[in-house]
């Protein structure tokens, strides 16, 4: 098992009172374990920023108990301080996770030298396979070439989820780092472009409710090099993925997608709200044909 393939960043189900529904989280993880290559806990899709430290640890334990040993498990451990990132990583390691997802600390906006020091300190403390997460729109800090070069000197830094949305940066990474880095698609509506340029990994939020559509696209492009089929499959998925990536309501759409797939996971934690009735109706029209096809 590895970072390659389709990996689902799990949504965090909430009850009506806003508390985490651990029973449903465990069932969701177990249900997806054999349908995708791996599962992630503590990513953007799971609203890690809206959970307390203890809640994040509890989600690690729930998913490890439900799916540990059945699939590749990655723990997102991003936080605002190096100390808390390490504490979260220690809990993930204790729970039996396979690997880590590490981004730049959000809001703090460290310099590139400070970011490098942060990443190296985390690696020294945890010593686990790590996927970097380059998402400056959310964190406020990019992972520069200079930092990436230094990190790749270490054996644990083996992959990067690229979420800048900049196709020219994708070209740059492929040209300069593809022989040393598992490049992972982190901008869902650009998945086909990533695969054309040799990416062999996709961390896709919509695979919470459309896992077969994601794996079909991945298999066509990456395993069979059949981009004619890949274009057809992406044409079906693209309207869904564009809504997720471009609407400003990524998490709300993922949650409603799960509901349409028969797994109501509740609403996002405030300040995020819900979709309008018009948005729900339009989204249902888009994905229900794909849900029926997968059944």
Image (tube, grey):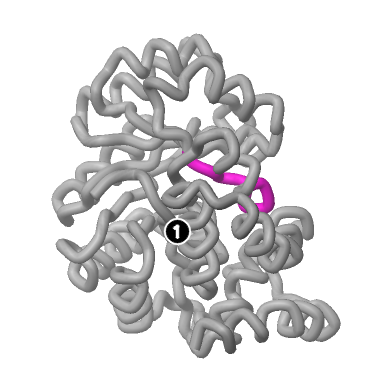
Give the answer, above or below, for where 64 lies relative to 130.
below
Q: Position of residue 248 (x, y in %)?
A: 75, 57
The question of residue 118 being in magenta is answered with no
Residue at image coords 65%, 35%: 164
Q: Per the image, is 186 magenta?
A: yes
> Where 30 falls versus 184 (above or below)?
below
Q: Nearer the viewer, residue 283 or 177?
A: 177
Q: Is residue 49 visible?
A: no
Please name the residue that numbered disc 1 is placed on.
Answer: 9
Mark 1 residue crowding within 10 angstroms, few (<14) / some (14–19) / many (20+)? many
> At which x and y percent is residue 99?
27, 44
**The magenta stretch spans which residues?**
184-190
- Residue 155 position, x and y percent, is 24, 22
| Residue under the image location 43 percent in, 77 percent down | 19
Query: Is residue 71 among the parts visible in the rendering?
Result: yes
How many marks on residues? 1
Say left or right for 115 vs 37. right
Residue nearer the viewer, 178 or 219: 219
Camera-side residue of 293 and 90: 293
Which residue is at a point 53% across and 72% down the rendered structure image? 210
Question: In the rendering, at what x and y percent does residue 167 appear?
Answer: 70, 32
SS at mark 1?
A: strand
In the picture provided, is 106 more to the left or to the right than 85? right
Q: Is residue 143 left or right of residue 30?
A: right
């Amino acid at each position: 098992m590895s970072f390659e393939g389709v990996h689902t960043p799990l949504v965090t189900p909430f009850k009506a009172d806003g508390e985490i529904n651990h029973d449903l989280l465990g069932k969701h993880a177990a249900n997806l374990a054999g349908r995708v290559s791996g599962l992630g806990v503590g990513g953007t899709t799971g609203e890690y920023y809206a959970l307390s430290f203890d809640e994040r640890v509890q989600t690690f334990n729930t998913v490890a108990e439900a799916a540990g040993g059945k699939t590749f498990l990655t723990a997102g451990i991003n936080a605002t301080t190096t100390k808390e990132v390490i504490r979260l990583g220690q809990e993930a390691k204790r729970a039996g996770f396979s690997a880590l997802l590490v981004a730049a600390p959000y809001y703090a906006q460290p310099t590139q030298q400070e970011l490098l020091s942060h990443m190296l300190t985390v690696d020294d403390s945890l010593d686990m396979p790590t996927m970097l997460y380059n998402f400056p729109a959310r964190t406020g800090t990019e992972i520069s070439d200079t930092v990436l070069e230094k990190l790749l000197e270490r054996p644990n830094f083996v992959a990067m989820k690229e979420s800048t949305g900049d196709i020219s940066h994708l070209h740059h990474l492929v040209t300069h780092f593809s022989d040393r880095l598992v490049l992972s698609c982190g901008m869902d509506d650009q998945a086909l472009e990533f695969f054309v340029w040799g990416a062999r990994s996709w961390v896709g939020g919509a695979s919470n409710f459309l896992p077969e559509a994601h794996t079909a696209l991945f298999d066509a492009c990456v395993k069979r090099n059949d981009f004619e089929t890949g274009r057809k499959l992406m044409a079906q998925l693209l309207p869904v993925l564009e809504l997720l990536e471009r609407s400003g309501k990524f998490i709300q759409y993922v949650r409603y997608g799960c509901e349409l797939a028969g797994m109501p996971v509740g609403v996002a934690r405030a300040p995020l709200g819900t979709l309008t009735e018009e948005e729900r109706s339009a989204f249902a029209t888009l994905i229900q044909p794909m849900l029926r096809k997968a059944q």
